[in-house]
Image (cartoon, grey):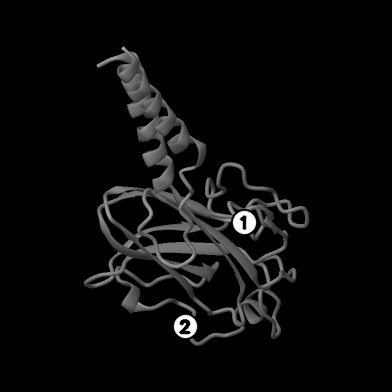
Amino acid sequence: MNTVFRIAITICSLWAFSAQATILSYTGIFSSDDQIQTFAFSLGTAGTVSARTWSFGGGTNAAGTVIADGGFAPDIWLFSASGTQDFLQHALACNIGSCPIGANTDPTSQNCWDVGLEIALAAGDYFIALTQDDNTAFGPFYTDGFSRDGQGNFTGPTYLGQDGQCIMVDGSQRSCGWALDIALPDATSGPGGAVPEPGSLALLAGGFLAWRSMRRRSI
């Protein structure tokens, strides 16, 4: 295989890899402490999936949106979306080592309680559930429910001794906002995904192939 053809094949391979990358960015606000927000996605092939929150300490998510600090302490739970909806992995705020790489320390509490997870998954359907900390999945299936179901303002009575929502364990008031990024190994994702355009890599590859064809005709 000649050098020009090798270069063209390499560039096409790089384009195929980049076109398959998918990062989903979500933001929202909880209306009650026991709310559970779910995010469905599908994998066409096996690969590694990662997810992380931004809302406790703030930062800039994958979509380029600046997320304010001051959100509640989040937990995220990964389940299979087929069959019995098996629990697969979780990341809990306040756990040692739960802070994702690149996450910010919250300036008010001086804690890093954003969370992240990473896991290799087979092709199939899955979903992530986001909850406030201490709203714990009973498991081992999503249908088993969560520990704070029906307790719409559990953080106020638990951590402050009075009604209130989005109260932290130290009694401080937090916002009820959340932000989550999910990184997928391919483009067969649920709503919100964006597949990068092939851009200059594909054009460059085409240029190499056209140049090679013209060179053959001139010989």
Q: CA–CA distance between discs 2 and 1?
A: 24 Å
On-image quarter of the N terminus: top left
Residue drawn at x 25%, y 52% as measured from the top left: 122
Direction from residue 100 to residue 56 in the image, left or right: right
Judging depth in this view, the residue of 57 and 184 nearest the camera is: 184
* 7 to the left or right of 122: right
At a point 50% along the width and 42% down the height, the residue shown is 199
Can residue 177 be seen here? The reply is yes
Which residue is found at the position 74% from the left and 68% from the top?
Answer: 172
Secondary structure of the residue carrying numbered label 1? loop
Q: Earlier in the sequence, mark 2 or mark 1?
A: 1
Mark 2 touches mark 1? (CB < 8 Å): no
Q: Point out the residue furthest to the left here.
A: 83
Q: How many tags in the picture?
A: 2
Residue that extends furthest to the top in the rendered view of this protein: 219
The outermost residue toward the front is: 218
Q: Name the kind of residue labelled 1 in the image.
A: Trp
The x and y percentages for residue 129 are 44, 68
- Up-down: is 11 above or below 36? above
Residue underneath mark 2: 149
> Does any portion of residue 6 appear in the rendered image?
no
Q: Which residue is mark 1?
A: 54
Q: Quadrant of residue 44?
A: bottom left
Q: What is the quadrant of the C terminus in the image?
A: top left
Depth order, front residue of 32/134? 32
Within the image, what quadrant is residue 173 found in? Answer: bottom right
**Residue 197 as seen in the image, left or right of residue 175:** left
Placement of 197 over or under 34, stated as above or below: above
Judge by depth and name the residue closer to the eye, 96 or 184: 184
How dense is the environment of label 2, judged by Cα within 10 Å: few (below 14), some, or many (20 and up)?
Answer: some
Residue 98 image point, x, y percent = 53, 50
Q: Position of residue 12 (x, y in %)?
A: 37, 34
